[in-house]
Amino acid sequence: MKKVFKVLRDLFGSNTSSKNDYLIWAKTEYGRDWQFAYQHMLDNKGQAPMPTKVYHNQNDNLKGWV
């Protein structure tokens, strides 16, 4: 029975909802760079772009203050 539901979902399901979700997420998380993030997710099966910098207790604005 699970196979039947999977086949029906694959057959009648829509990919536009996931593309719309990617667009909303990219605009929310990336601001001005949303086009880059959106295209990256389309090209990489929904995988979000990795940040170029790791922010674990690292803030360039506070360097020398802490």
Image (tube, rainbow, N blue to C red):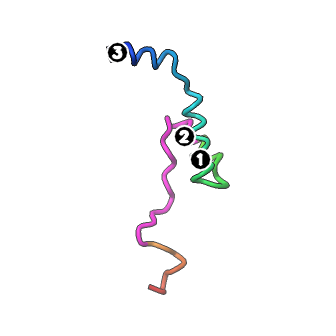
Q: Nearest to the eye among marks 2 and 1: give it.
A: 1
Q: Quadrant of the C terminus?
A: bottom left
Q: Which residue is mark 3?
A: 3
Give the distance between the C-alpha atoms of the residues marked 2 and 3, in whole angstroms. Answer: 28 Å
Would you identify the image quadrant in which residue 16 lies? Answer: top right
Looking at the image, do the residues carrying marks 2 and 1 touch, with CB atoms under 8 Å apart? Answer: yes
Q: Nearest to the eye among marks 2 and 3: give it.
A: 3
Query: Which of the two labelled residues, at mark 3 and mark 1, occupies the earlier sequence position?
Result: 3
43 relative to 9, above or below: below
Query: Which of the two labelled residues, at mark 2 and mark 3, occupies the earlier sequence position?
Result: 3
Residues rendered magenta in the picture: 40-57
Crowdedness near tag 3: few (<14), some (14–19) or many (≥20) residues, C-alpha within 10 Å: few
Q: Which residue is mark 2?
A: 41
9 relative to 27, above or below: above
- Tag 2 secondary structure: helix
Q: Which residue is mark 1?
A: 26
Q: Answer left or right for 13 relative to 24.
A: left
Query: Which of the two labelled residues, at mark 2 and mark 1, occupies the earlier sequence position?
Result: 1
